[in-house]
Image: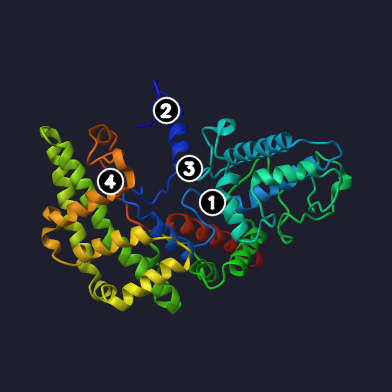
Amino acid sequence: MSGLSWLDYSEKDRRRTLEFIETFRERDTRDELGIGVIRDAFSDLLFPGTTTVQTRIRYFLLIPWAYLRVEAYARGGAERSADQVAGRARELEVATIRALLAGDDKEGVLGRDARELLKQLPSRIYWQGLGVWGIRRFPGSRAQLHRELARTSRVSGLAEFRDPDEDVGLVGRRSANWHEGLPDPPVDVFTKSSFALRPEDAYYLRDRILSSTADTLLAHLVAITVTPTDVDAPWLHPGWAEFPPVHREQLHHARVFATVIRGATLLYNLMLARKKSEGVEASLELVHTYEQRLEEWQLEMEDLGDELDRWAQPSDQARFWALVESTGARVVRTRRFVESWVDIALGDRASLRDDHSAQQLIRDREIGLKRGLARLENPHALEGWSEASGIGPITYRWSTVQTFMNDIATGLRGADAAAD
């Protein structure tokens, strides 16, 4: 097994390491049983262009603004290598981190501790979303853009972007790499910045979402959001009753699946707790905790009532898989596991924690995914168990999306206040 460790007690180093790890996994849940492909399919269906490691929506502007300066640097007269272009891009992203930390709102600053040592730059985290929302017009990766800019030896197609550090003769041109309607940045964007959206920023991002992700729940939310919300899942949104039928249907399937499959992750953790407790009296409390959580899960299933009964019908199951596969997700093996779990979970749930067939299904699934590193079979792998693997509720990137919508709502409210 591989792992990460550190040999001092520096809180700063600890947070830096955890931040590095965080960029590689979803915040909603660790995918111990391989159901992430379904979770991500619904996340993309509902909220395209988002990921759980995104933090604030203004990065959808900060990154293009930085790259417009990179273009000015690359086309400023001297020949640049791809490495030099990449280095300049990195310098500007680090400058953005420092500028945000110099502002009043530091919640969601990527790289707040690592800064110049940050490995996963914000541009990497937002690059795909920038393309999905039509803000990035360049079709390739960051590395491809760096090489393309390095090959460019003459000034052409530069964005309308006043950069006091560059030749004023470069001002007034447009970039084919970025959306033509991109708002101009504040003059001090790289010295003291903020996540607060100006009215023109909020209107622009709203219009990009509406234009590029039309007919999605994300577009519907940005169209109706006028005040910030604070709910734990999209199906708890105060405007739920007025959602279009297509979105309510998608959320019906997403919600029931999230609830049903959570039983599998809880049983998996219970099985690990029991294995860990063999001969260890202190671990019995952990076993009891997961037994209680399974009982609470059974109550959650009962609370779904008619919605769960409807989802159990063959027609609803067929629709569920049609929605998953409509995103291009490949789910052949995962589908077999989920369908087997659904049959068990919708059966005699009262004895699930001691159900042999349920436990064998979980065991076979982990071994099929991890082979020799399966924790239920490998004592050394079990030692790395965090005692809470993948038990968080699946909410399909809702935390990220709600923050985005709240940022836009606050920006639009600023526009209304200015109008008054």
> Who's the residue at 46% across and 78% down the image?
244
Q: Which residue is mark 2?
A: 11
Say which mark, if any, is on residue 56.
1
**Residue 307, quarter of picture:** bottom left
* Whole-number angstrom distance, CA of label 4 to CA of label 2: 36 Å
Image height check: is 136 above or below 383? below
Give neighbour class at mark 4: few <14, some 14-19, many 20+ (Cα, 10 Å).
some
**Residue 280, quarter of picture:** top left
Tell me which label, 4 or 2, sits earlier in the chain: 2
Image height check: is 179 above or below 392? below
Amino acid of disc 2: Glu
Task: Name the image quarter holding the C terminus.
Answer: bottom right
Image height check: is 239 above or below 141? below
Q: Which residue is mark 3?
A: 23
* Whole-number angstrom distance, CA of label 4 to CA of label 1: 38 Å
Helix, strand or loop at disc 3?
Answer: loop
Work out whether residue 243 can be spotted: no
